[in-house]
Amino acid sequence: MVELENIVKRIERILDYYELSASSFADKIDVPRSSISHLLKGRNKPSLEFVMKVVEAFSEVNLYWLLYGKGTFPYKETTLPDQKKPSIETKIKKTTHNKHSQKVIVLYSDGTFEEYHQNPS
């Protein structure tokens, strides 16, 4: 369950971490400065739109951490910079074991897709 007063505490932690004033934080997430003031003083509750603006503006803020306190802050992915991402073929081989795939379809956010057909060996 989302506890709104704890979200406010996590927002205060974000302000401290980035060394931001309430007004500069409001500018950064593109909300009225008064809304931050009301939120920090407990007069208002954060909306979903507000929470999403925070997550979008600060890459180190994880949505689940902000809402539920689960996870870590600052959030960092654990991928090494020189580590290569495995190819689709490598992923298929690792996950299918003794199964033989016939086709992989990659769907893109713009509605397009690509099909990859496995050549029989």
Image: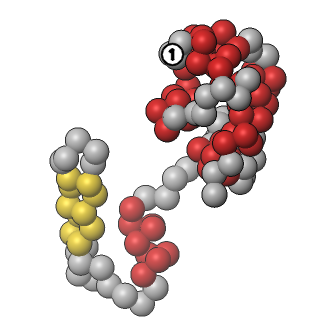
Residue 101 appears anywhere in the view: yes
Relative to 42, is 3 above or below?
Answer: below
Residue that badge 1 annotates: 30
Q: Please state if 75 lies on the left or on the right of 57 as rendered.
A: right
Q: Please state if 58 lies on the left or on the right of 15 as rendered.
A: left
Relative to 76, is 16 above or below?
Answer: above
Quadrant including the C terminus: bottom left
| Residue under the image location 18 percent in, 47 percent down | 112
Across and down, in percent, residue 92 comes to 40, 72
Nearer the observer, 59 or 104: 59
| Residue under the image location 20 percent in, 61 percent down | 115
| Residue under the image location 52 percent in, 53 percent down | 85
| Residue under the image location 74 percent in, 42 percent down | 6
Nearer the observer, 112 or 8: 8
Q: Judging from the image, what secondary structure is the residue with disc 1 in?
A: loop
Q: Residues within 10 Å of mark 1 (few under 14, many from 20)?
A: few
Quadrant including the N terminus: bottom right
